[in-house]
Amino acid sequence: MSKKVAYITGGTKGIGFGIAKILTENGIAVAISGRNENEVKKASEALSLEDAPALGIVSNVRNAKDEEHAVAEILNQFGRLDYVIANAGMGIFKPVDQLSSGEWSDMIDTNLTGCFHTLKASVEELKKSEGYYITISSLAGTNFFEKGAGYNASKFGVVGFTQAVMLDLRKYNIKVSTIMPGSVSTFFNGHVPTEADEWKIQPEDIGELVLDIIKMNPRTLPSKIEVRPSQPGK
Ligand SMILES: NC(=O)c1ccc[n+]([C@@H]2O[C@H](COP(=O)([O-])OP(=O)(O)OC[C@H]3O[C@@H](n4cnc5c(N)ncnc54)[C@H](OP(=O)(O)O)[C@@H]3O)[C@@H](O)[C@H]2O)c1
């Protein structure tokens, strides 16, 4: 059987890169995307193994056409698609009276509509492979907080969307899950990880979690997964 193939949106750094790294190391062919051509090239080169090149694709998940093009490139290179991880996301944290309509749209269009675009572009291939569609939501998709109106709305939306998609697609033997992480050490919102972030979940830990769930017995589906640092930060 040919190698399984995964597509991870927003895989140039952070959680997406961590997932891509673990999947590549475990014999899965990987395609990653991002909006910046240089970053996409750098990350795909870093992920490539001698016998397993990683494919880098420039795509903005806010554009349905970009995601259609991304899936076409994956099929052209690898000939199949088994695992789709809708991970690309961003956050702007402000009290709602200071949040602009543009900032609201940036979050909804990227975090929520982006998951829809990625799914629409890949669902027919997932039917063929009886594959897996995973969204990266957040604990912000179940716990609301001050200055989180836009981000909370987008991530609560991702949780609801993914659960409904799970019900629609299980009849095709496609598994669907959402992962809802707490603090992960990434570049999110302009952060630069340092030693002070060691208490947080590391991106590779989310990669191990993805690997565990895609290997799970076909009869069992962990549809909604909360994951948090074992100890809160100091
Ligand atoms: N870090 C946390 O504590 C945490 C916790 C829970 C959930 N999450 C979620 O995890 C996901 C990944 O975030 P992260 O923490 O890994 O952040 P990150 O380090 O900033 O990485 C974000 C990735 O998404 C890409 N991206 C952003 N907007 C995009 C778009 N419109 N189209 C395509 N790619 C795009 C970025 O590349 P470009 O900017 O170059 O396009 C980058 O590769 C997000 O959905 C986030 O909400 C993060």
Image: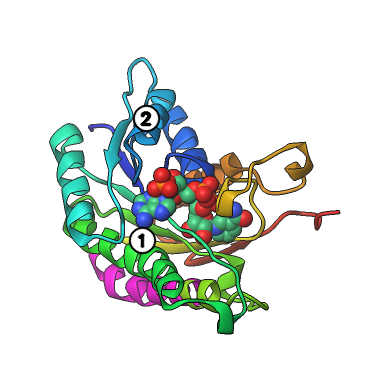
Q: Earlier in the sequence, mark 1 or mark 2?
A: 2
Determine which of the numbered discs, if any, sits on residue 199 in the image: none
C-alpha separation, residue under disc 1 versus residue under disc 2: 26 Å
Lateral position of residue 144 relative to residue 13, left or right:
right
Q: Quadrant of the C terminus?
A: bottom right
Up-down: is 101 above or below 42? below
Can residue 168 be found in the magenta stretch? Answer: yes
Secondary structure, mark 1, is: strand
Q: Position of residue 104 (x, y in %)?
A: 44, 74
**Is residue 173 among what the camera can see?**
no
Can residue 87 be found in the magenta stretch? Answer: no
Residue under the image location 28 percent in, 48 percent down: 59
Q: Nearer the viewer, mark 1 or mark 2?
A: 2
The residue indicated by pointer 2 is 44
Number of marks in the rendered image? 2
The residue indicated by pointer 1 is 175
Residue behind label 1 places its C-beta within 8 angstroms of ligand 1: no
